[in-house]
Image (tube, rainbow, N blue to C red):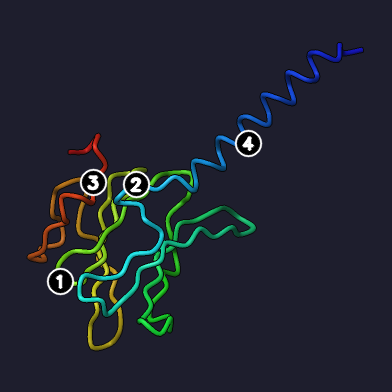
Amino acid sequence: MIPSDIIRTSIALATFFITASCCRLVETKPNQQPLQPSPSGKYVLRMLYEITDDDTYWKIQISDNDDNVLYKDPEGFLARFNVYWCWDTSNRVWLYNSDDGRVFFWQATDAGWEKVKWGAGKVNECGVDALPPDELYPAYVK
């Protein structure tokens, strides 16, 4: 039989870790705000946290000011890794994925929103003449 103080300690530790992991999800940093208007005020970026049967994902969603969804990233990024996001002054959404250092941006086109893999870290691999804002990156990358 397990002594009751070991059971209480186990329950307390489990509660702490569950609470700590939940609190981590709602902690927001400047480059992790879940709701951000674009610099022009024309768009609103929402970072969604979606749980599926297979895994949990961060997903970019871009809406207009009337809350009409204009774009939602179908793939997303695994939520067990951190992602960081922000707008630039040209109304592009940028995302840094801490898993592998990949950087993406989304921009409005005549056909809708386009997702572009910009590169890795601070290295432009796509040839597009655009740079991620400095505030995109977490402190450990700067």
User: In the displayed image of the protein, which residue is found farthest to the right?
Assistant: 1
User: Mark 3 falls on what kind of element?
Assistant: loop
- The answer for how far apart the CA atoms under marks 3 and 4 are is 28 Å
Q: Nearer the viewer, residue 43 or 104?
A: 43
Could you tell which of marks 1 and 2 lies nearer the N-terminus? 2
User: Mark 2 falls on what kind of element?
Assistant: loop
Checking the image for residue 19, the label placed there is none
Could you tell which of marks 1 and 3 lies nearer the N-terminus? 1
- The answer for how far apart the CA atoms under marks 1 and 3 are is 18 Å
Could you tell which of marks 4 and 2 lies nearer the N-terminus? 4
Instruction: Residue 59 in the image: state x and y as whole percent.
Output: 44, 62
Q: Amino acid at mark 3?
A: Tyr
Instruction: Give the labeled residue for mark 2.
Output: 29
- The answer for how far apart the CA atoms under marks 1 and 2 are is 22 Å
| Viewport quadrant of the C terminus | top left
Identify which residue is drawn at 27% across, 50% down: 102
Q: Amino acid at mark 1?
A: Ser
Instruction: Give the labeled residue for mark 4.
Output: 18
Could you tell which of marks 3 and 2 lies nearer the N-terminus? 2
Instruction: Residue 97 in the image: state x and y as whole percent.
Output: 33, 49
Does residue 43 appear left or right of residue 132 in this picture?
right
- The answer for how far apart the CA atoms under marks 3 and 2 are is 11 Å
Could you tell which of marks 3 and 4 lies nearer the N-terminus? 4
Q: Amino acid at mark 4?
A: Ile
Instruction: Give the labeled residue for mark 3.
Output: 137
Instruction: Give the labeled residue for mark 1.
Output: 90
Q: Give the number of the mark in front: 3 or 2.
A: 2
Could you tell which of marks 1 and 4 lies nearer the N-terminus? 4
